[in-house]
Image (tube, helix red, strand yellow):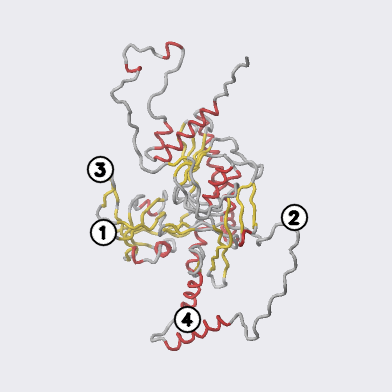
Amino acid sequence: MAGEQHRRQGRAGRLATLLTGMVLGGSLVAGYAWFDHAPRAHATNQQPAAAAPPPTAPPADFSRYRKIDLFARALAMIERHYVRPVDGERLIQAAMAGLTSELDPHSEYLRPREARLLREDIEGRFGGVGMVVVMKRVTTPKPRLVLDIREVIAGGPADKAGVVAGDFIVEVEGKPVGHFHDLSQAIMKMRGKPGTMVRFKLEPQRPGKDGQPTAQPVREVNVARAFIDAPAVVPKYLGEGLAHVRLRDFSETSARELASAIEAMRSQGKADKSGLRGVVLDLRDNGGGLLDQAVAIVDQFVGDGVIVTTRARQGQLMDVQRATARTPWRDVPLVVLVNKASASASEIVAGALQDHRRAVIVGEQSYGKGSVQAPFELGDGSILKLTIALYYTPDDRLIQASGIAPDVVVGTEYVPYRDSLPQLEPERAHPRHLKPTDFGKPAVAVGESPALQAAGEDRQLRAAVEHLQALGTVLDKPRRRGKRR
């Protein structure tokens, strides 16, 4: 217990510096990257510039606070003359939100309650129901906004209540989803003190006769909130020495959890005499997280060189993160899965592994969130989050608004294998064919491998497995050398 308390205090203590985050298609996919030093200029060999002429003196009546005085006068007029009494504190908060509305979409003012939600996301432990949701607009049976359940955390309150990924939430506490200003408000409504109840209406989505999801009768669900301590890593051993590791986010323990998961699956591989022949690092729907965790994860696969570069205003070099010699999985074949919802720290990892030619990137073009936000605490629990820099890959590619292009583009629709010539039977179908075993050769297995069967109908994961199998075959076989003549 004491160790757990110390771990939580350490988490809270680190909430003080630099972050990245994104808002994706009406959904909140929050991620944060922190460091504990002030931005500093790097030394260069350039000659000092000639002395600039002295600045022109400002007018005698100039005051940098003149516009602030105008704001104070406007606030006083509203408080005195508006037709109804107003809350001055709420007006000031609204004005601060208005300041950031003129900046990029990732710069914002977070009220104390919203700032607390941010801290909970970073610490990875909060009172909730154990679901990952996104806000989605649907057109059937009528146009409306719903919360699309992307994931249900095993053993959590929602899981125990029978909620299934793919279902739609249409109301929270009697309020239609469309009445919430954004996803963060809906999330705050579902979160709360552990042990308290939350009520929402659920519209199950089940496959119809054509295989497409169809809406089912709406049912009301009441669940008791609980502490949600969701794991950052969801591992699955596919068999044949292949490991599938889904990284849900870049929280404070992600790199350590990833290393432990791969090590555990290597042990499973040893047990079935396959060893560790390849890893699928799944970054789909991962909206970002702690920068130091992204760097530490790349460091597990890359032995040296730049991982990510950060540049501030006017391209000023702000920080360079490099790989170290601590690289436990340097030689393990690696495929990285990304999709449109892979953003921020996910793009840093995918871009670094791609530039180092360390992994094959499979999936879709990533989101393109490559800006850096710094949180400035304002003393009352609120936070001013400002974009202060941009991220670049090792090859100096800008991530912002560009994203990471996969090496192999694979969509999500699963199409079963179709025989190009079904009327033509193979040689082995003939009852009198010569069997390979007659010549001391093993028979070739027909049909899907166990690893492909484990991948199921996830088309992108199946493509990743196929690439790992091909890489493993190439790397396992010694290179054939011809004789000189």
Write down the residue under mark 1.
142
Q: Secondary structure at mark 4?
A: helix
Q: Residues within 10 Å of mark 1 (few under 14, many from 20)?
A: few
Q: Which residue is mark 4?
A: 88
- What secondary structure is found at the residue carrying circle 1? loop
Q: Nearer the viewer, mark 1 or mark 2?
A: 2
Looking at the rendered image, the disc whose residue lies closer to the viewer, 1 or 4, is 1
Q: Is residue 270 above or below residue 158?
A: above
Which residue is more in the foreground, 394 or 449?
A: 394
Task: Estimate the spatial distance between the alpha carbons at disc 1 and disc 2, rounded to whole Å.
Answer: 65 Å
351 displayed left or right of 325 = left
Instruction: In this rendered view, identify the residue nearer to me: 171 or 391.
Output: 391
Q: Is residue 464 above or below residue 68?
A: above
Please give the residue where the numbered disc 3 appears in the rendered image: 210
Please give the name of the residue rendered at 37% of the width and 62% of the height, measured from the top-left corner: 197
Mark 2 surroundings within 10 Å by alpha-carbon count, few (fewer than 14), some (14 through 19), many (20 or more): few
Tag nearer the camera, 2 or 4 = 2
For the residue labelled by badge 2, is the local secondary structure a helix, a strand or a loop? loop
